[in-house]
Amino acid sequence: MNRRELLKRAGLLGLSGAGLRSLAIEPEGVVVSVPKKRALRFAHLTDIHIEPELRAAEGLAACLHHLQSQKDAPSFIFSGGDSVFDSLKATKDRVELQWRLWHEVWKKENSLPVEYCIGNHDCWGMGEKSDPLYGKKYALEKMHLDKTYRSWDKAGWHFIVLDSIHPKQDGSWYTIRLDDEQFAWLENDLTVTPADRPVMIISHAPILSAAVLAVDKQVKDEEGYVLGGGNMHTDAARIIGLFDRHPNVRLCLSGHIHLNEQVTYNGVTYISNGAVSGNWWNGKHFRTDNGYALVNLYVDGSFDNEYFTYGWNDTAR
Ligand SMILES: [Zn+2]
């Protein structure tokens, strides 16, 4: 009996993702549970929305303290976008003030490396288009990046950061999707990545979400669900079609909806990890409390994701 048949008999084939143990076959054919080998552990913080009001800086500091005090601390942090608040409609002075505050808090309260992803609130739309910091350039400068999407290999995994924000021509608003150039880049990036290397993708907005259907009155009487273009990726079908050709894509992390949820579809798990700011620093957003996630990636291509609240809404402030 081969390994696949053995696992099938044991009813274990098809299990993936969460869990701290994997299965091994002893020479005599006995299935045993052994500790899984971890490749990496990181924190995912998203939708921090720092601003001088609502004690946002204090909240971010509390979150950073909480995660760095974890007994099993992460080795780096993914910041998933919407670092600041509403740059699209804010003056340059206001945007500058928020980013200054952002860097002050991180410099003072964090000792871990940070990888950035851009969010819709990070795009600046109030200035002249000729301004060297107009649109995404403001955020790129503050995140110390040249490009809004990129990829790299680390600890046996392939990491991809996507840019979900597709601004409308007049800069007034945005649609959540990849433009053709970025999609072609993603297609090529997955093609040149070895098929046996597990892939993790991070985007600001979810590529796929079920929770967006269950909040914010998305149902209109005559039409049924009307999601609009600002919730999850409007090009989800196209991206999922691409993932179908690359089964080594395992995990897609996002934020943006300020809700903690997990959806698995066609072998890929899509997790939205709530928001550090909760309901934009006004309590919980629906039932998702202010929080962040710690993510383990394992050598065998599996993973787990745990959402932690850091007590921001529990204490008298
Ligand atoms: Zn957002």
Image (spheres, rainbow, N blue to C red):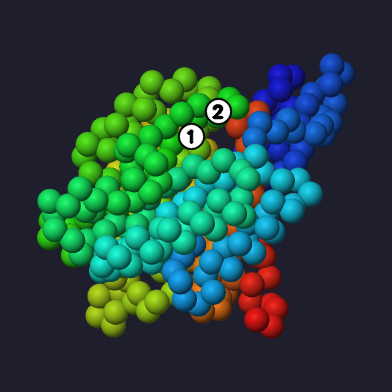
**Vertical arrangement, residue 31 with respect to residue 98, above or below:** above
Q: Could you give the CA–CA distance between mark 1 and mark 2, rounded to whole angstroms? A: 7 Å
- The x and y percentages for residue 262 are 54, 56
Q: Which residue is mark 1?
A: 159
Residue drawn at x 25%, y 80% is: 222
Q: Quadrant of the C terminus?
A: bottom right
Residue drawn at x 32%, y 71% is: 225
Residue drawn at x 42%, y 32% is: 151
Query: What element does badge 1 sit on?
Result: strand
Q: How many marks?
A: 2
> Looking at the picture, which amino acid does disc 2 mark?
Lys
* 16 displayed left or right of 187: right
Q: Quadrant of the N terminus?
A: top right
* Residues packed near mark 2 inside 10 Å, few (<14), some (14 to 19) or many (20 plus): few
* 44 displayed left or right of 185: right
Question: Of 267 and 120, which appears nearest the observer?
Answer: 120
Query: What element does badge 2 sit on?
Result: strand
Q: Respond yes or no on whether mark 1 lies under 8 Å from ligand 1.
A: no
Judge whether residue 17 can be spotted in this image: no
* Residues packed near mark 1 inside 10 Å, few (<14), some (14 to 19) or many (20 plus): some
* 19 displayed left or right of 128: right
**Vertical arrangement, residue 111 with respect to residue 124, above or below:** above
- The x and y percentages for residue 171 are 17, 60
Judge whether residue 106 can be spotted in this image: yes
Q: Which residue is mark 2?
A: 154
Q: Give the quadrant of residue 212.
A: bottom left
Q: Are marks 1 and 2 in contact (CB under 8 Å)?
A: yes
